[in-house]
Image (spheres, rainbow, N blue to C red):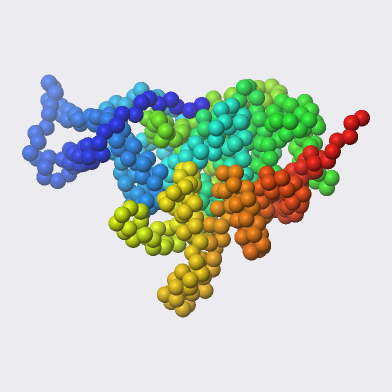
Amino acid sequence: MRSQAGNRPTECEATAGVWALALMIALAHGSGCGGGSASRPARFDADGAAVARPVPAMPQSVRQQLLDGALTVLGRLDAYDEASAFAQVFDRLNQWSHGLVVAGGDAGLPWKLDPLYATLPPTLAALATPEALASGVFDANDDVAALRDQRWLADIAATARGDAIDDLAVACNLFTWTVRSLALVSDPPPVPTLAAPGTRWFSIGEVLLSGRASGAQRAWIFLELLRHAGLDGVMLATGDATAGSLRPWLPAVITGGECYLFEPAYGLPVPGPDGAGVATARQAAADPAILRGLSLPDRPYPVQATDVATLSVLVPAAPLNLARRMHLLDAQLAGSGRIDLALAATDLGAAALAALPGTADAGRVRLWEFPWETLRRRRDAAAAVSAAAAQELAPLLITLEEVGPGARETRRMVRPLYAARLREFRGDLDGPEGAKMAYLRARPSAAAMAEALRQAPPEQADGLRRLYDAMKEDATYWLGVLTLAEGEYATAADYLGRMILEAAPDSRWADAARTNLAVAEQALGHTDKAIALLRADPSPQRFGSRLEAARLEREATPQTKP
């Protein structure tokens, strides 16, 4: 359901800069403003009517260089000041867009507003009007930030898929990354209410940087990763849309004509028949035991086989995925630096509907409102959302001085925790400029922290100390998650167990450290420890942890032959 792109020619960076300068001069002289226009006689046709002076077409190689330059900056934000980087990206994107239009490159890619846009309620549709979606002009803030987030997602998808080739195996690897890397919290809810409006309406980038997500945010990130991995995924919903009782349920991967089910709130794929593999929607509808298998004695699973027979499809298309300018941009991207932006929402919804049990009724397909609701809440409750994001992301803003690489050993200012996150997203883990070293730099010694506090104004010392402690704790936890992903189980157990659960039992990472430590202990052959950790999980993921503990107990218990 994505656009196909061609080859990407290369050109020297200087060419793009020279052309950009020439373009700005041409635009300034041709705008009708200033005295320069007086020296250029107008052109007229045979009837004496003025005709527009043709604008020289920008070479395709220069347009591609502008585009490559913009995406390169977005992929290396740890090396830039973000404000100036955003300005560079915005400028290059709009130069590229203008050059594409002048060259007629947009004519070969017809665009129309996706019909599923009409399924949005007016309050959400107003966030991106048809006119705004049809525009070819990039926004300096929202578009650039969204492209940054998509760059990060594409990098994560490229590394998190591992060596898997089969579609379902790739999807399972991406789901494992999502659960391991995003600690589950309850805010924001999948559907806000007056009683539970939610506060953490974070952008995708903020969710990734914070490493914490609600069930709906986990589902959103997982579906985004699927798209960047070349797979199709949708949200499924129970209830009746026409009666206003639609309830988002879980994400599903569409492959081989089937919808495979993943439960982000439990941190588990839905087990297939007899607990093997990943269940499909058709299997869950035909065999009540599949969803009953997600029930606990004191907590029945809220969805039953009868609900699955009438599921609706919620297509995860945000304004970015529907906008004409993003479709044009998507068609120009190729190669290892590719990011997938465009989404044919109606086609994806139809493919998902065909993979579900029951009658293929097009009325059962809608846009998923959660990405749009996130935008609305960020606008309407900007102060509360910004405050929540600032509190969680504050440790990433701490700047330290360090000696740069190379023989010169120049000193530079870096944000070690921020740099570590971005390098981990890219898969740059080892070496002096890798994520591991950056995380270690974010764990300064007691002496270094004492010196920093000594230089701070006395009235700021306590707040700065708490901030340094949070940075060090964050880095410790993320080192545990990173080493767990690499299969360094003993090292991961040390970070997550001794340095988090034992040293900081009240840490905001304690619950996630506990469930990830259980994975490490199980891999080390310490099944009893893993079971105890899972049964002690008090987090929103606790129901899935108890199910996983029960599975480990069954596998550890010798089976008697009849």
Q: Position of residue 263 (x, y in %)?
A: 68, 39
Extreme right residue here?
A: 562
Query: Does residue 262 appear in this view?
Result: yes
Q: Position of residue 65 (x, y in %)?
A: 29, 35
Tell me where residue 497 sits by quadrant.
Answer: bottom right
State the residue at coordinates (36%, 41%).
72
State the residue at coordinates (53%, 62%).
472
Nearer-the-camera pick, 100 or 536: 536
State the residue at coordinates (11%, 32%).
42
Position of residue 354 relative to residue 441, above or below, is above
Query: Does residue 375 appear in this view?
Result: no
Residue 376 left/right relative to 4: right
Q: Position of residue 544 (x, y in %)?
A: 72, 44
Tell me where residue 111 sits by quadrant.
Answer: top left
State the residue at coordinates (68%, 46%).
524
Residue 217 left/right relative to 146: right
Residue 392 left/right relative to 294: left
Nearer-the-camera pick, 413 or 145: 413
Residue 26 left/right relative to 188: left
